[in-house]
Image (spheres, rainbow, N blue to C red):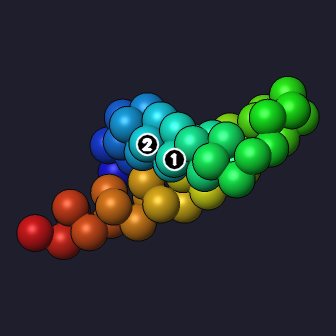
């Protein structure tokens, strides 16, 4: 299951981090620390999300 979760992480992290960066830019925070922070938070949130998705896929 770890292999599947790590493959999913590449997709999930891109989607979540990209969404977070777009949300930060739409809020008007155009500083580098805000953009990098949003991307980092998105990458951290993607780790348990990809694990949960992999677990759900293995249940089928």
x%, y% of residue 59? 18, 71
Q: Which residue is at a point 47% across and 35% down the rendered structure image?
A: 14
Q: What numbered label is drawn on residue 47?
A: none
Q: Which residue is at a point 26% across and 69% down the rendered structure image?
A: 56
Q: Is residue 6 above or below residue 23?
A: above
Residue contact between numbered discs 2 and 1, judged by CB atoms under 8 Å: yes
Which residue bears the numbered disc 1? 19
Of 4 and 48, nearer the camera is 48
Name the outermost residue toward the top.
Answer: 32
Count neighbours of disc 1 (C-alpha within 10 A) and say few if under 14, some if 14 to 19, many if 20 or more: some
Q: CA distance from mark 2 to mark 1?
A: 6 Å
Q: Which residue is at a point 86% across and 32% down the rendered structure image?
A: 31
Position of 44 with respect to 19 (left or right) is right
Of helix, strand and loop, which one carries label 1? helix
Of helix, strand and loop, which one carries label 2? helix
Q: What numbered label is drawn on residue 15?
A: 2
Name the outermost residue toward the left.
Answer: 60
Count neighbours of disc 2 (C-alpha within 10 A) and say few if under 14, some if 14 to 19, many if 20 or more: some
Position of 25 with respect to 9 (left or right) is right
Q: Is residue 10 visible?
A: yes
x%, y% of residue 58? 21, 62
x%, y% of residue 12? 42, 45
Of 41 and 30, nearer the camera is 30
x%, y% of residue 57? 20, 61
Q: Is residue 60 above or below residue 36?
A: below
Instruction: Tell which tag, 2 or 1, sits nearer the viewer.
Output: 1
Could you tell me which quadrant the C terminus lies in?
bottom left
């Amino acid at each position: 299951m770890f292999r599947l979760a790590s493959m999913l992480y590449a997709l999930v992290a891109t989607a979540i981090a990209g969404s977070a960066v777009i949300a930060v830019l739409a809020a008007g925070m155009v500083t580098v620390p805000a953009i990098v922070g949003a991307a980092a938070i998105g990458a951290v949130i993607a780790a348990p999300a990809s694990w949960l998705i992999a677990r759900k896929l293995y249940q089928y």
